[in-house]
Image (cartoon, rainbow, N blue to C red):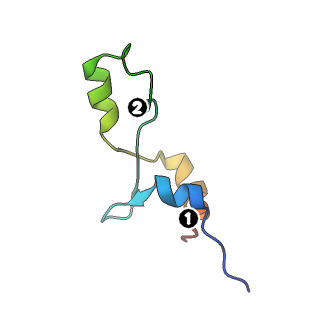
Amino acid sequence: MPKIKTNSGAKKRFTFTGTGKIKRKHAFKSHILTKKTKKRKRNLTQTGLIDKVDVKNVKALLGVR
């Protein structure tokens, strides 16, 4: 059986925590930042976790069981 290739876009965007959950970054923090409030930009800087319904698909992209 051939090896499964890791999705290059996914491996740049997701990392695993020590307990096996998948971390992600928030969107909307790259440009047009002048109209966004400081509070909004500060909260977008923090990482979040992948939602439970998306875990299976993201693990498939990363080639993890």
- List the residue tagged with mark 1: 62
* 44 vs 6: above or below: above
Q: Nearer the viewer, mark 1 or mark 2?
A: 2
Residue 39: x and y, percent?
Answer: 25, 21
Q: Nearer the viewer, residue 35 or 62?
A: 35
* 37 vs 51: above or below: above
38 left or right of 28 in image: left
53 left or right of 43 in image: right
Residue at figure coordinates x 38%, y 13% from the top left: 35
- List the residue tagged with mark 2: 29
Residue 32: x and y, percent?
Answer: 44, 21
Q: Nearer the viewer, residue 49 or 41?
A: 41
- Dividing the picture into quadrants, the one containing residue 28 is top left
Residue at figure coordinates x 40%, y 43% from the top left: 25
Residue 42: x and y, percent?
Answer: 26, 29
Q: Nearer the viewer, residue 41 or 59?
A: 41
Residue 19: x and y, percent?
Answer: 32, 64
* 44 vs 15: above or below: above
Q: Nearer the viewer, residue 39 or 56?
A: 39
Image marks 1 and 2: residues in contact by CB distance under 8 Å: no
Q: CA distance from mark 1 to mark 2?
A: 24 Å
24 left or right of 47 in image: right
Residue at figure coordinates x 55%, y 56% from the top left: 10
Disc 2 residue type (three-letter): Lys
Residue at figure coordinates x 72%, y 83% from the top left: 2
Give neighbour class at mark 1: few <14, some 14-19, many 20+ (Cα, 10 Å).
some
**Quarter occupied by the N terminus:** bottom right
Q: For the residue labelled by badge 1, is the local secondary structure a helix, a strand or a loop?
A: helix
Q: Earlier in the sequence, mark 1 or mark 2?
A: 2
Disc 1 residue type (three-letter): Leu
